[in-house]
Every structure is written in C-alpha cells, then in structure tokens.
Image (cartoon, rainbow, N blue to C red):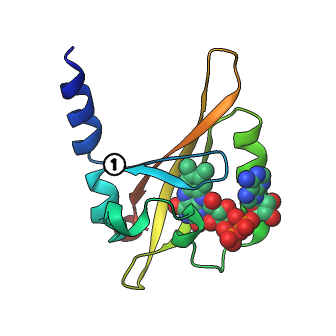
Amino acid sequence: MPYHLFVETVEQVPIAISITDKKANILYVNEEFTRVTGYLPEDILGQNESILSDKRTPRSVYYDLWHTIRSKKVWRGTLCNRHKLGQRYIADLAIAPMLNEDGVITHYIGMHRDVTLTH
Ligand code: FAD
C-alpha cells in the first residue's frame, strides 16, 4: 500500500486520534480529533492531553489509566472531556502504548468518540 494512502487513512478515519510522548504531550492529531474537541493542530500540538480534562473526574480514574498503560496494556474507559469552547462531552476513549522493537514504551495513541448523545 502506498505510504500516502496510509497517512490519508489515519487523517480521515472517523475516530479522534492523537499520538503523544510518554508524558501525554500531544505530537499529532487527526481531522476527527479537531472536529470532536474543537482544537486545531496549531492550538494543541505540544500541549498535554490534560487540556481535555473537565477537572472533575476522580483522580483514581487517571491513576488506573496510567497504571494500565504504563503496564503496556490498553486502557478503555469513559471520561468527561471539555471542548475548546467549554462545553462538556462524554468521551469513549481507548489509550494504547506504542512499543519499540525492544518492547519499550515510546509513545501513546489515544482514540476517542463523543458519545454524549448515546448516553
Ligand atoms: P495529571 O497531572 O495528569 O495527573 C493525574 C494522575 O495521573 C497523577 O496523579 C498520576 O497518578 C497520573 N499520571 C499523570 N501523568 C503520568 C505519567 N506521565 N506517568 C505516570 N502517571 C501519570 N485525559 C482526559 O481527561 N481526556 C482525554 O481525552 C485524555 N486522553 C489521553 C490520551 C492519551 C494518549 C494519554 C497518554 C492520556 C490522556 N489523558 C486524557 C490523560 C491526561 O494525560 C491526564 O493524565 C488527565 O487528563 C489528568 O490530568 P490532570 O492535569 O488533572 O492530572
């Protein structure tokens, strides 16, 4: 498959995708991420994923999230996020660690959907 087709697929896939470093600093977002969160790449690249937090989620949820992904497992859950314009939405989220050939975590990939209307 041509490389540009692979890149276009990730750009246009209908789920909000972000790729971060090991501290959740955002390195890449796709078009659906911008649609769901309101943040353009230039708004959010270099910012931390915590910019999306509505700051009401119990810390135990984030502790579980980080414990899971640092154990090289996929975390799946529902968080309350905040859109750039301020409104809250329910995010159905999966976070997967990306490993190098030595099995060491190098990045994380986040994938989420706004499921506010389905709750
Ligand atoms: P934080 O300062 O992040 O701390 C909360 C707790 O998380 C800490 O007490 C600690 O237990 C743990 N923690 C934080 N950073 C680390 C670390 N580097 N290593 C180990 N433990 C750590 N959050 C959302 O609210 N919405 C999202 O959509 C979302 N998407 C994410 C996508 C990805 C790919 C990743 C990696 C993280 C995502 N997060 C998301 C989590 C986000 O990074 C924050 O941890 C969370 O938003 C809480 O932010 P905070 O500033 O309140 O607390």
70 sits to left or right of 37: right
Could you say where residue 89 lies in the image, as x and y percent from the top left? Answer: 44, 73
Vertical relation: 19 (above or below) 45 = above
Question: Residue under circle 1?
Answer: 15
Residue 106's quadrant in the figure? top right
Vertical relation: 102 (above or below) 97 = above
Query: At 47% from the left edge and 62% from the top edge, which residue is drawn?
Result: 91
Q: Nearer the viewer, residue 46 or 56?
A: 46
Residue 33's quadrant in the figure? bottom left
Give the amino acid type for the residue marked by disc 1 in the picture. Ile
Could you say where residue 55 lies in the image, as x and y percent from the top left? Answer: 64, 79
The answer, for residue 64, to whether it is visible in the render is no
Could you say where residue 22 lies in the image, as x and y percent from the top left? Answer: 66, 45
Q: Quadrant of ligand 1?
A: bottom right
Q: Residue furthest bottom?
A: 86
25 sits to left or right of 11: right
The answer, for residue 57, to whether it is visible in the render is yes
Query: At 54% from the left edge and 71% from the top edge, which residue is drawn?
Result: 51
